[in-house]
Amino acid sequence: MQRHVTTPTQPGWLRIFLIGRRPKTTLVRAGVLIATCFVVFRFILLPIRITGSSMLPTYRDGQINFANRLAYLRHEPQRGDVVSIRLAGPSMMLMKRIIGLPGETVVFRAGHVHINGQLLDEPYVKQPCDWEKGPVVCGPDEYYVVGDNRSMPFELHEQGRAERDRIIGKPLL
Amino acid sequence: MKILLRLAALAALAALGWWLWTVWFPGPEAVIRQRLAELARTATIDGQDSLITRVAKAKNAAGFFTRDAEFLFESTGYNTHQFSGREELAEAARAGFATFRSFAVEFIDVTVQVAADRQSAGVNCTAKVRYGDSKEVAGQEMRFQWRKVDGTWFILRLETVKTLS
């Protein structure tokens, strides 16, 4: 009796291109990728779109970035850090730079920042500024934040003391 | 196998029953969230809305507040405003709706805390406002105090929250 042996047919190139040689493996890989992206972009790196001009020229209106929520896992925010500050939640945030640390006194005098009476060097400020603001003392858990665009009118520029628990991370880029 | 299937069917029925219960008899938090969403829709003005529609929307928006409600508005770049009473709020809403051609309001990141007596609640959220066809949005943190009056939740107090002090 003759035995007939049939060789399995090779899948077409389109099928290989779309779902690979082993569909089950492809499905598992896709699942892992989706889960990883969900965890990363939902809890670790929040995609953000910058609106407004308060951080010019460092960040422009319309730029895309990511808020790194793990930035302050091992250390506290430092002076000079650009940070994301949540409003009621993380869906909308302010992006400002820290100039004053907890316990420090911040003063704007003729557009220059003084911390505890000492002039602060701010190389990131490129525009002229004439702001005047009386001494503001940061509480034990507060950071003084302000944008880099100091040519804006003082009344229109959102700035002040942010509580530590509102600072949720720093821009990745 | 049959027992497992029956248990699974029972669990699915229980889940369905619980879901229907929450839809037909929502808790205070769900009701407040619905009211907040309704307020956002009422406060949204389309460029094609006529003056009569805007006046009606202003009156409807004020209807979400108690008669003795208070609204305190403080935000960077704007003058401070304080309104007391539903009529004053309606008047302010009419003026606001007449000033802007169109804007869309949305409340996001809503957290609701219902008091133990289930007659009052506090809500914290961000008001997201888009003016006209602009891509830019303005965000302002808000704090609401709600009170249940004759079975319906109304806003007793609304104030803006200063994110940066």
Image (cartoon, coloured by chain):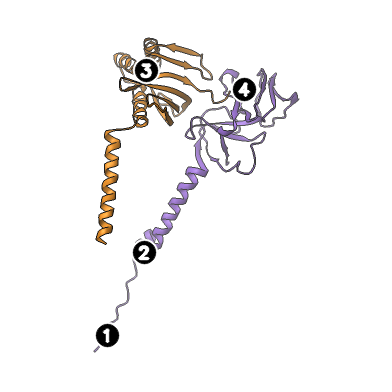
Residue A10 in the image: above or below residue A93 = below
Which residue is pictured at 63% across the width and 30% down the height? A143
Q: Nearer the viewer, mark 4 or mark 3?
A: 3
Q: Which chain is orange?
A: B
Q: Of helix, strand and loop, which one carries label 2?
A: helix
What is the crowding at mark 3: few (fewer than 14 residues within 10 Å), some, or many (at least 20)?
A: many
Residue in front for this viewpoint, B63 or B66:
B66
Q: Are marks 4 and 1 on the same chain?
A: yes
Which amino acid is tagged 3?
A: Phe
Mark sitting on residue B77: none
Residue A135 in the image: above or below residue B1 = above
Label 4 lies in what chain? A
Report which residue position mark 1 lands on.
A3
Q: Residue A30 in the image: x percent, y percent?
A: 41, 55
Which amino acid is tagged 1?
A: Arg
Report which residue position mark 2 lands on.
A13
Residues under labels 4 and 3: Cα distance? 41 Å
Residues under labels 1 and 3: Cα distance? 86 Å
Q: Is residue A111 left or right of residue B70?
A: right
Label 2 lies in what chain? A
Q: Are marks 3 and 2 on the same chain?
A: no
